[in-house]
Image (spheres, rainbow, N blue to C red):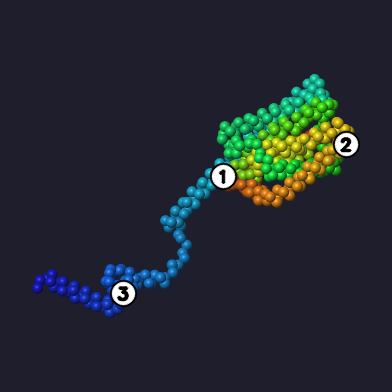
Amino acid sequence: MDYNQNNNQNNNQANNQYNSQGFNQYGNYQPQGYNPDNMNGQYNPYGQNSYYGAQQNLNQNYQQPTVQQPMNYPYGMRNNQQNYILSQQRFLRLREQKNEIKKFSTTFATAMLGFLIASYAISFILMFGDLMSLYENNATFSASVGVFYSLTAVGIPFLIANKVLVKNKLQHETASTIYSAPKFTLKTVCLIFLSVLGCLAAMYVTGFVSVFFSIFGFDVSAGDEPSINGIVDIIALFFGTAIIPPLVEEFAMRNVLMQTLRKYGNLFAILASAFAFGIFHGTPTQIPFAFLCGLFIGYAVIATESIWTGVIIHAIVNGISCAYYAAAYFTDEDTGDSIYAAIMLVLAILGVIALIIYIAKFKDEFTRIINIKGLNDYSTGEKLKKFIFTPMMILAIIVFLFQAITCITPATGVTT
């Protein structure tokens, strides 16, 4: 027997001894793949008596302990990378939105300052010759100046602002359809009279402001009353008060301003446009009045998706005073007061009826419209801050408020 034969015999004896000990130690151990439960003798590595089957039974009773995933684990690294990417994307969105809102604010504030400069230029022109006297004593000439004032001082600056927004592709997607005629459905009619009711209520706020200043011995100038000397003056007054200004101002405030800001949510657009609308009127009594009117008109325009709804509301509110002057001319001042009060009462009743119907028929409409948030990475309050607190807007606010202060004078017989 050679060396290799002896070596093989020794290895076989060792293996047999090891297998025998292993069999005696583990008893039911079966070769991998053998399954005595399978009567067909098919190969099944996961049989009940197989090695993997036994491991599977053990694993069923085993509960994986909950361990916090280490930061350097590959999956954790992927999560961190995704969170970092998301945070960077949000940072870029916030910066882009902030810059865009500031662009809107600067554009609108520049247009408002342009309006103020143009209005002072017109006032300066009226100082030559007898133009100022004619303006104060001739209602037709005064109304004609008002039409020119609206078309130039208001229309041109905001028309330029609109061109800038279109050129830079900053307008809202509904800007091109806002001039479609409103459908005179029940909802539209209710919104018109409901908004007029809100504007009438805002008149009482104006009265409280006047009373507040009078308590401290000041009068607030509300402008000179027109001198009506004929039917031509009445027609000119209606045209220069209830037709042209609503058209031009609604284009400026509800189209150029509000429709552009709707990209960032309806509530933000309504509040920002109402704020600018109030500042735009530039007197202590007109600022709160115009702000509250802007809230109602802005909502009505968005709800009906037509700027003509706002023009109608604006025309009715402005036309109330024209109706008073017309009634006073054809009758007398006392009768004019009575007719004015009757018109106010009728509009108030129609407004209350419209409010009841709107709540009953369209109770979910208000919530749906206001909850359209647009780009909402910033809250509505944060958007308003970024819109108001830009250098140009702050400058415009200061200038308009200074103009409002000049309208406050000591009351007659009161010395300061």
Is the N terminus in the top left, top right, bottom left or bottom right quadrant? bottom left
Q: Is residue 296 visible?
A: no
> Around disc 1, counting alpha carbons within 10 Å, would you say few (fewer than 14), some (14 to 19), or many (20 or more)?
some
Q: Secondary structure at mark 1?
A: helix
Q: Secondary structure at mark 3?
A: loop
* Mark pair 3, 1: CA separation: 67 Å
Task: Report the residue at 66% width, 28% height from top.
Answer: 156
Task: Report the residue at 79% width, 22% height from top.
Answer: 131
**In the figure, is residue 18 to the left or right of 108?**
left
* Residue ranking furthest to the bottom: 24
Q: Are marks 3 and 2 in contact (CB under 8 Å)?
A: no
How far across and how far down the image is residue 40, in percent?
27, 71
Give the mark, 2 or 1, whose residue is nearer the N terminus.
1
How far across and how far down the image is residue 8, in percent?
16, 71
> Around disc 3, counting alpha carbons within 10 Å, would you say few (fewer than 14), some (14 to 19), or many (20 or more)?
few
- Number of the front mark, 3 or 2: 2
Q: Which mark is residue 335?
A: 2
Q: Which mark is residue 37?
A: 3
Q: Is residue 354 visible?
A: yes
Residue ID for mark 1: 94
| Disc 1 residue type (three-letter) | Leu
- Number of the front mark, 3 or 1: 3
